[in-house]
Image (cartoon, rainbow, N blue to C red):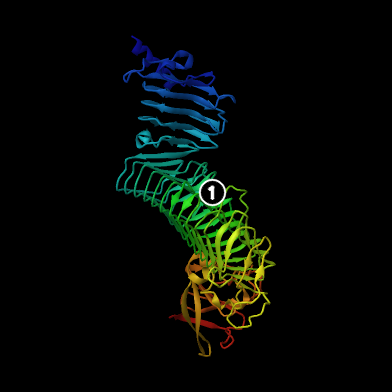
């Protein structure tokens, strides 16, 4: 007779929409499935689960959850309940923690921050729930794959968009999901293509392998844009917008060999967050705005950050705890610190980067690293080993072959810095060459650094000044160089560009083979001539090559000599030519879409007429 009564009550609630108001429901164990805690029927066995149904719950500020069920094994159903006003940032309208065999269906959440929170639970079913939230609609967390083994149907929605939750998929492609939430758990060899997220939950890849996310468009997610947890060999690529995430654009945790390539990652709290994940690769991405572009921690081994561009990030790259990281051939423009290495980072290589208009170009607390071939312009301090107040002791680093230009200080070495080898750098037009309060090694191999306004004699003509340079703090360069010709190659990103010969002609048939640097990748086009000393730039030409016809405009900020620019169509035809003023905020373009543009110091094309044609490259 009891089962018949229970069935009647459930049908009455579901069909007639009966509801009754009450305060939050809190269940800490199987013993708490009682009438006082909202149970209206059921005995807690599979064929007769406990029923919590028909309640309208107004959350109170002192309780973080509207419905809270934890540490249970008995079957239960939460049906037809409304939770209103769950406004605790750390809570949720419905929380299921360490539970099994539960069903949540036909529930409604509104005026709340977070919707349904599930942690360390198994064998749950969610269907037909409507979650209108300002935070995360659905969050599933766990420390093992079985904690994600749930049936969560697409009939659930977050802010009007369906939830797509997949467990155990293999060898398939999911295309064009416009979603309120996406989770791939236990997936193998799955491609997620063209997914769209806007003002809802992000994409979660957990306990999976060989997942590829392509062409995602993620805007304003309420947590991370993409979360990768315990999922090695995940690839995120060719996604033009991962933007405005409340937390990270992409979070990589306990996942080795993850790659992020050709993505636009903008205005997130952190662009990419990497924790305890080895052999991570970020390549050919664009980062703009937000406090941090890339943050690496958790003793991640050998992460590679290569050929990215960073614009107006307070910190471009932050290496909190990493072993053997590489930051190479990246372009940085406008921020507080270009590359920041904390004391738990060791064996870093920071090389061939161009850093323009930063407070500190490179700030280092790490040890046994190499900082070389970087180009830093308009920094407060080019390279700094900041005071650590006995909390870090940067030891055994090498600083060589860097160009620091038009900065206030070239170098600063704090009191804890030890055994830093400093040689063959160019300190050019800086107000102060260096300060050294540590115990470091200037000119360890008999050759020091070049200083643009050094006036010492060189009596024997060996290229080394006879008068040592003493720095504030006690450091001394005993062997200042007389010539900058010691520098092995062009600095920063310029030194990584391909060298070709552009074949040019004019309307009169005059011909000019012009050696050029080819800027055919985004980070190369982004930096161009920025920050380059005119004495170096006057011998260069840069051919900007785009992937398709474009109407992009060029600027001259942080470019210190007048240039000419010539625009070419897809067939090399002449589209326009103009002079560009040094260090100007003006924009320069042409009316017709172009495929290539050639920047040269003014006068370099004087042997040709105005209408120049590009015949090709050799």
Q: Quadrant of residue 414?
A: bottom right
Q: Nearer the viewer, residue 290 or 150?
A: 290
Q: Is residue 577 above or below residue 272?
A: below
Q: Is residue 298 left or right of residue 457?
A: left
Quadrant the N terminus occupies: top left
Image coordinates of residue 580 in percent, x first then y, are 64, 74
Q: Quadrant of residue 315?
A: bottom right
Q: Is residue 372 visible?
A: yes
Q: Is residue 194 above or below residue 548?
A: above
Q: Residue furthest top?
A: 1
Q: Label 1 neighbourhood size at 10 Å, few (<14), some (14-19), many (20+)?
A: many
Residue under label 1:
270
Q: Nearer the viewer, residue 342 or 58?
A: 342
Q: Is residue 492 left or right of residue 280?
A: right
Total labels: the figure holds 1
Image coordinates of residue 504 in percent, x first then y, are 50, 84
Image coordinates of residue 360 in percent, x first then y, are 62, 58
Q: Is residue 578 visible?
A: no
Quadrant the C terminus occupies: bottom left
Image coordinates of residue 27 in percent, x first then y, are 46, 20
Q: Is residue 617 above or below residue 121?
A: below
Q: Is residue 283 above or below residue 607?
A: above
Q: Nearer the viewer, residue 485 or 550?
A: 485
Q: Residue at x 36, y 22 (%)?
A: 75
Q: Secondary structure at mark 1?
A: strand
């Amino acid at each position: 007779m009891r089962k018949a009564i229970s069935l009647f009550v459930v049908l009455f609630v579901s069909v007639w929409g009966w509801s009754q108001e009450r305060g939050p429901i809190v269940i800490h164990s199987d013993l708490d499935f009682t009438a006082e805690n909202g149970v209206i029927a059921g005995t807690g066995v599979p064929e007769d689960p406990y029923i919590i149904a028909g309640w309208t719950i107004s959350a109170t500020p002192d309780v973080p959850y509207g419905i809270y069920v934890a540490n249970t094994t008995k079957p239960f159903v939460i049906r037809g309940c409304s939770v209103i006003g769950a406004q605790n940032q750390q809570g949720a309208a419905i929380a299921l923690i360490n539970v099994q065999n539960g069903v949540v269906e036909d529930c409604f959440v509104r005026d709340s921050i977070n919707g349904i929170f599930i942690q360390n639970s198994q064998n749950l079913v969610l269907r037909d729930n409507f979650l209108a939230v300002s935070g995360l609609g659905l969050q599933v967390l766990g420390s093992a794959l079985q904690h994600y083994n749930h049936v969560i149907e697409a009939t659930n929605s977050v802010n009007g968009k369906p939830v797509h939750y997949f467990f155990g998929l293999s060898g398939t492609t999911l295309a064009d999901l416009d979603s309120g939430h996406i989770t791939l758990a236990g997936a193998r060899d799955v491609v997620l293509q063209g997914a769209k997220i806007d003002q809802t939950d992000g994409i979660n890849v957990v306990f999976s392998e060989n997942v590829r996310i392509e062409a995602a468009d993620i805007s304003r997610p309420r947590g991370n844009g993409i979360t990768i947890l315990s999922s090695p060999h995940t690839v995120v690529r060719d996604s033009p917008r991962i933007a405005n995430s409340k937390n990270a654009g992409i979070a990589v945790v306990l996942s080795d060999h993850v790659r992020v390539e050709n993505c636009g990652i903008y205005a997130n709290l952190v662009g990419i967050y990497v924790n305890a994940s080895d052999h991570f690769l970020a390549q050919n991405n664009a980062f703009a705005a937000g406090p941090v572009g890339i943050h690496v921690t958790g003793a991640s081994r050998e992460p590679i950050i290569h050929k990215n561009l960073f614009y107006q990030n307070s910190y471009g790259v932050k290496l909190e705890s990493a072993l053997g990281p590489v930051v190479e051939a990246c372009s940085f423009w406008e921020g507080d610190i270009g590359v920041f290495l904390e004391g738990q980072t060791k064996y870093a290589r920071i090389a061939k980067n161009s850093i323009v208009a930063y407070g500190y170009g490179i700030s280092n607390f790490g040890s046994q690293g190499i900082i070389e071939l970087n180009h830093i312009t308009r920094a407060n301090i080019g390279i700094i080993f900041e005071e650590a107040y006995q909390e870090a002791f940067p030891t055994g680093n090498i600083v060589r072959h860097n160009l620091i230009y038009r900065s206030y200080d070239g170098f600063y070495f704090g009191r804890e810095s030890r055994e830093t080898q400093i040689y063959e750098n160019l300190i050019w037009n800086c107000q102060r060459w260096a300060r050294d309060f540590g115990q470091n090694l200037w000119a360890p191999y008999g050759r020091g650094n070049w200083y643009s306004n050094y006036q010492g004699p060189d009596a024997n003509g060996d290229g080394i000044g006879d008068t040592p340079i003493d720095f504030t703090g006690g450091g001394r360069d005993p062997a200042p160089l007389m010539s900058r010709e010691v520098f092995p190659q062009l600095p920063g990103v310029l030194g990584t560009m391909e060298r070709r010969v552009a074949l040019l002609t004019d309307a009169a048939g005059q011909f000019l083979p012009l050696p050029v640097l080819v800027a055919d990748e985004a980070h190369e086009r982004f930096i161009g001539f920025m920050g380059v000393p005119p004495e170096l730039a006057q011998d260069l030409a840069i051919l900007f090559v785009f992937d398709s016809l474009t109407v992009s405009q060029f600027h001259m900020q942080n470019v210190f000599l007048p240039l000419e620019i010539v625009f070419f169509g897809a067939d090399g035809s002449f589209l326009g030519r103009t002079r560009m003023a040094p260090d100007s905020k003006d924009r320069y373009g042409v009316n017709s879409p172009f495929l290539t543009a050639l920047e040269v110091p003014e006068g370099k094309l004087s042997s040709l007429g105005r209408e120049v044609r590009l015949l090709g490259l050799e």
